[in-house]
């Protein structure tokens, strides 16, 4: 009993820390850097399962959502989707609450402990696993089983691995919702027009990337301009390390979900970071930069490339915005194919719901009917439905169009594993993936040792939680 209690307490601590991950993902995700004002969640339910049905004889489902775009644009777009559902012939009515990134995880945790979580919520897959590990996720497997039995075309319409990453201990605990790619964006007026680099919308090798960095340094270094920057604070080094690992075909996990930071291909990634450090391609002090500082450097012309989330921060400067492009996938020497790191969010239904069938019906309906949210909601994100990308919006909108063109390269942030392991959230929150990169930026040349140290730390978390 003591062991089970300790494990539950550990999971609750990870869940409490998850707000840091949510905020980090929000800040570096698709158009998520402007949080909506928090709405007050509904009062806790009395817990009386015999309570009569609400007026109109339809159950009322509570949907707590995150603000994946500016409040004045995203919130009305999401409410419009919900209104369409409520106007249709469905078994329930849905009430929407768009909360803020800050404190979201704590609000969910408090609601779970009080016996009144919402019926449905959204979050990154690795965050949702914590609810599943607590026994709070409603199993959605029968939805997918019905799709398979009926040959539902949605199965072929989802980006690869989206369903697999929503599984926990054999159950489908979440269905995919949106995806955000991570890529290098750059000053096209400098790299293309002035420096003459071409085919940057194609896969770019590590060697070519270094050539670009050197050309920027030689031509603009005297003006205090640096080629490139990551941000490292607020989980930025974790995201940066993932980006580079996937570029070299390795990821941080093996196919069977075990830590792989000591893989020779991963060590080569750290060596590459060290080479860029030694050649002066990063700004001094980058090890302490947050996202806003990197965005300011880019906006003021002090760096020419940034490898992170989207470039929505440039919208205030129309000329800069239109001169910013997304580079094709960066490809290391050990990669078998060009790939890009992506983060995916899913929808989860809570097991405590009084209306499991109605809740599952809404989750499925939402997945099949949310195209307008991406077109009108200002998310800067991409839908997981490939057919939605055929909407002319993704050609006409400069920001999302830049990322949509590379969606075939996306793999999720825990690739190569088939499912996201439970310990992932803690690994991210504690910065274990980014620690080797930070050590190198602070002067370490022990590439093998730094990666082995990170691998052992991750193994310990896996052992403790799994």
Image (cartoon, grey):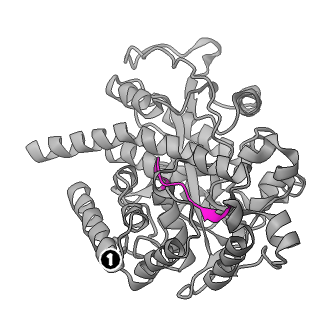
Front position in the image: 154 or 51: 154
Residue behind mark 1:
446
**Is residue 26 found left or right of 314 in the rendered image?**
left
Q: Quadrant of the N terminus?
A: top left
Place residue 115 in its image quadrant.
top left
Residue 278 location (% of width, % of height): 49, 75
Q: Is 26 in front, or is 416?
A: 26
Q: Is residue 73 above or below residue 189?
A: above
Mark 1 residue element: loop
The one nearer the camera, 448 or 97, is 448
Residue visible at 49% across and 42% down in the picture: 22
Q: Position of residue 213 (x, y in %)?
A: 66, 74
Q: Is residue 59 left or right of residue 197?
A: left
Magenta segment boundaries in residue numbering = 225-236
Compared with 42, 250 (above or below) is below
Q: Residue at x 82, y 51 (%)?
A: 321
Left/right placement of residue 274 relative to residue 448 reads: right
Residue 38, image x and y in percent? 57, 22
Image quadrant holding the C terminus, namely bottom left
| Residue 211, x across and y down, in percent | 68, 81
Q: Residue furthest left?
A: 2
Seen from this angle, which residue lies furthest front? 222
Q: Identify the residue shown where x is 49% and y is 69%.
A: 415
């Amino acid at each position: 009993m003591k062991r089970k209690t300790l494990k539950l307490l550990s999971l609750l601590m990870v869940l409490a820390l998850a707000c840091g991950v949510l905020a980090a993902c929000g800040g570096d995700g698709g158009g998520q850097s402007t949080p909506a004002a928090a709405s007050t969640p509904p009062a806790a339910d009395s817990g009386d399962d015999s309570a009569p049905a609400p007026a109109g004889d339809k159950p009322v489902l509570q949907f707590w959502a995150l603000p994946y775009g500016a409040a004045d644009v995203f919130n009305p777009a999401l409410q419009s989707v919900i209104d369409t559902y409520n106007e249709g012939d469905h078994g329930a009515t849905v009430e929407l609450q768009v909360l803020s990134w800050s404190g979201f995880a704590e609000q969910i945790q408090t609601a779970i402990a009080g016996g009144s979580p919402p019926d449905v919520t959204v979050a990154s897959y690795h965050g949702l696993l914590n609810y599943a590990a607590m026994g709070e996720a409603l199993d959605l497997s029968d939805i997918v089983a019905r799709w398979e039995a009926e040959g539902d075309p949605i199965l072929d319409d989802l980006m690869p691995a989206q369903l697999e990453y929503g599984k926990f201990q054999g159950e489908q605990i979440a269905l995919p919702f949106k995806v955000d790619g991570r890529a290098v964006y750059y000053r096209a007026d400098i790299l293309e027009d002035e420096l003459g680099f071409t085919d940057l919308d194609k896969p770019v090798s590590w060697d070519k990337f270094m050539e670009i960095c050197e050309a920027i340094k030689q031509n603009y270094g005297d003006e205090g301009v640096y080629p490139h920057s990551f941000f490292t604070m607020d989980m930025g080094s974790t995201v940066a390390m993932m980006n580079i690992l996937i570029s070299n075909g390795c990821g941080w996990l093996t196919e069977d979900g075990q830590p792989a930071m000591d893989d020779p291909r991963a060590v080569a990634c750290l060596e590459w970071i060290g080479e860029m450090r030694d050649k002066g391609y990063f700004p001094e002090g980058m090890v302490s930069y947050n996202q806003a500082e990197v965005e300011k450097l880019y906006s003021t012309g002090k760096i020419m490339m940034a490898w992170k989330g989207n470039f929505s921060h440039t919208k205030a400067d129309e000329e800069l915005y239109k001169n910013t492009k997304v580079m094709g996938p960066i490809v290391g020497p050990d990669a078998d194919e060009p790939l890009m790191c992506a983060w995916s969010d899913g929808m989860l239904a809570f097991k405590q719901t009084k209306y499991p069938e109605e809740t599952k019906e809404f989750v499925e309906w939402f997945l099949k009917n949310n195209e307008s949210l991406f077109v009108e909601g200002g998310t800067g994100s991409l839908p997981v439905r490939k057919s939605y990308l055929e909407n002319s919006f993704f050609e006409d909108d400069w920001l999302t169009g830049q990322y949509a063109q590379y969606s075939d390269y996306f793999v999720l942030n825990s690739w190569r594993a088939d499912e996201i392991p439970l310990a992932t959230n803690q690994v991210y929150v504690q910065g274990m993936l980014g620690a080797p990169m930070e050590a190198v930026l602070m002067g370490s040349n022990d590439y093998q040792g730094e990666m082995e140290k990170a691998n052992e730390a991750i193994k310990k978390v896996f052992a403790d939680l799994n």
